[in-house]
């Protein structure tokens, strides 16, 4: 492997040691900026300059932000950059202007997940000494690899004969579907003619590339709070208004929303809670729920019905209900014009032995905000899958990426970007 290759693997492992969830990517953003400066990219937007600050979703409370900010400082994050991220304005946009030509965008996500990483000796990050240093957080979806690929692509394009502008969006908060909209609504996307996004793994092995992924389910995360009236459960139950009953009524009925003739829908009440003791009529309860749909319209159908159920359940038990949408993403489609280019380029990349033109994701992704924005402005977008052997499934404690897929990802994406600029597909 080249010196650059070694360096990028070290970088990926450094990011892996410091997984940071939505709007807490302080160390990560600082490391990315350090690398951009090493590469010689001068046009760098961080913090409020990188996003529309009013469009962030699922922002954690300030004590949480302060704690992660301090951790990043302790880990040695670059002070001048760190200060500009204060308040949870993480993420970064890097712009490389290299002569006359189209503007090509690349979106990579950079956040980690709130879950514990495996301590098993056979888990490579343990064996090789780069397991998560943040207890309860982990890069369990490969976004450490995505950030690394984004930087590798910038470096490769800078050294190439590419003519045009390359913008790389290092997006925070994908896992909570919290950051895509803030990037999409920033001014940086307005002039993007072509957009690529990528993901490692997705059950495709190292050496396999999927040129255009479709089938993103539109999704909304709902945080629901019921409030009632407390009372003594023995002496005066009739004086209470039971929030847990309202919650329980709602959960059962959320799953009773009729299916839709136009396509697939989903609903899940993934986390619930309420009350304080067995002898008190509970005055508060909550549900963390989500709805999904094959199209944005189908997701909206589920959301409207879910809201009706939640209000009805509250009414039935004399409670109030507050519903807050904490994360959201539309559906999207990859454009064939771009997928064809990715497919042709990938076939000639060393280490690639299988190219699939299409596959469906079956999950959700907020890159769809960026894809739709570019398509709405008359541009084209595609979501590319870069296979990687992963010992555990995505989001599990033993997930890891095969580092051989990182240079493959860089070659496929940078090759496709050069070909897009050269041929300007319509
Ligand atoms: Zn992911």
Image (cartoon, grey):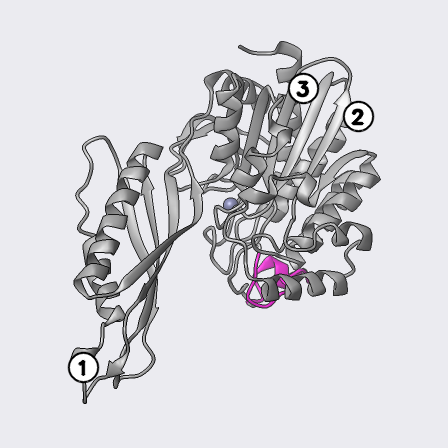
1 and 2 marks in contact (CB < 8 Å): no
**Mark before the other along the chain sequence, 2 or 3:** 2
- Residue corresponding to mark 1: 237
Identified at 47% across, 57% down, the residue is: 396
**Mark before the other along the chain sequence, 1 or 2:** 2
- Residue corresponding to mark 2: 159
- Residue corresponding to mark 3: 418
Kindly report the secondary structure that dominates the magenta region of the rendered protein: loop
Percent from the top left, x then y, of residue 217? 37, 38
Dividing the picture into quadrants, the one containing residue 156 is top right
The residue range painted magenta reads 120-138
Percent from the top left, x then y, of residue 147? 65, 43
Foreground residue among 326 and 394: 326
Percent from the top left, x then y, of residue 325? 41, 49
Percent from the top left, x then y, of residue 333? 42, 26
Is 268 left or right of 179, judged from the image as shown?
A: left
């Amino acid at each position: 492997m080249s010196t650059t290759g070694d360096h990028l693997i070290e970088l990926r492992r450094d990011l892996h040691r410091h997984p940071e969830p939505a709007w807490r990517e302080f160390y990560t953003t600082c490391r990315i900026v350090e690398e951009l400066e090493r590469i010689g990219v001068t046009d760098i937007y961080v913090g409020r300059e990188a996003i529309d600050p009013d469009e962030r979703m699922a922002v954690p409370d300030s004590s949480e932000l302060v704690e992660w900010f301090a951790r990043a400082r302790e880990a040695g994050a670059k002070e001048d950059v760190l200060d500009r991220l204060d308040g949870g304005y993480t993420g970064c946009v890097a712009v490389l202007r290299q002569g006359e030509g189209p503007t090509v965008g690349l979106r990579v996500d950079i956040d980690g997940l709130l879950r514990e990483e495996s301590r098993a000796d056979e888990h490579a990050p343990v064996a090789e000494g780069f397991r998560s240093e943040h207890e309860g957080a982990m890069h369990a979806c490969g976004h450490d690899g995505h950030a690394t690929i984004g930087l590798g692509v910038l470096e490769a394009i800078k050294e190439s004969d590419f003519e045009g502008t390359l913008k790389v969006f290092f997006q925070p908060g994908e896992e909570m579907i919290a950051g895509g909209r803030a990037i999409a609504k920033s001014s940086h996307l307005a002039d993007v003619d072509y957009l690529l996004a990528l993901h490692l793994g997705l059950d495709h092995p190292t050496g396999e590339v999927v040129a255009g992924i479709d089938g993103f389910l539109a999704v909304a995360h709902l945080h629901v709070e019921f409030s009632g009236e407390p009372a003594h459960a023995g002496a005066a139950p009739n004086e209470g208004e039971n929030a847990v009953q309202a919650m329980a009524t709602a959960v059962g009925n959320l799953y009773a929303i009729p299916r839709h003739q136009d396509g697939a829908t989903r609903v899940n009440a993934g986390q619930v809670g309420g009350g304080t003791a067995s002898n008190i009529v509970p005055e508060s309860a909550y549900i963390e729920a989500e709805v999904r749909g094959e199209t944005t319209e189908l997701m909206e159908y589920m959301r409207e019905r879910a809201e009706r159920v939640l209000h009805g359940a509250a009414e039935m038990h004399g409670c109030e209900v507050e519903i807050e949408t904490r994360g959201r993403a539309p559906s999207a489609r990859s454009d064939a014009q771009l997928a064809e280019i990715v497919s042709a380029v990938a076939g000639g990349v060393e280490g690639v032995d299988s190219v699939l033109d299409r596959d469906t994701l079956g999950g959700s992704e907020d890159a769809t905000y960026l894809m739709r924005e570019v398509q709405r402005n008359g541009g084209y977008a595609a979501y590319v899958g870069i296979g990687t052997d992963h010992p555990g499934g995505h989001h599990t404690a033993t997930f890891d990426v095969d580092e051989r897929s990182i240079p493959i990802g860089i070659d496929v994406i940078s090759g496709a970007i050069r070909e897009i600029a050269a041929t300007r597909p319509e």
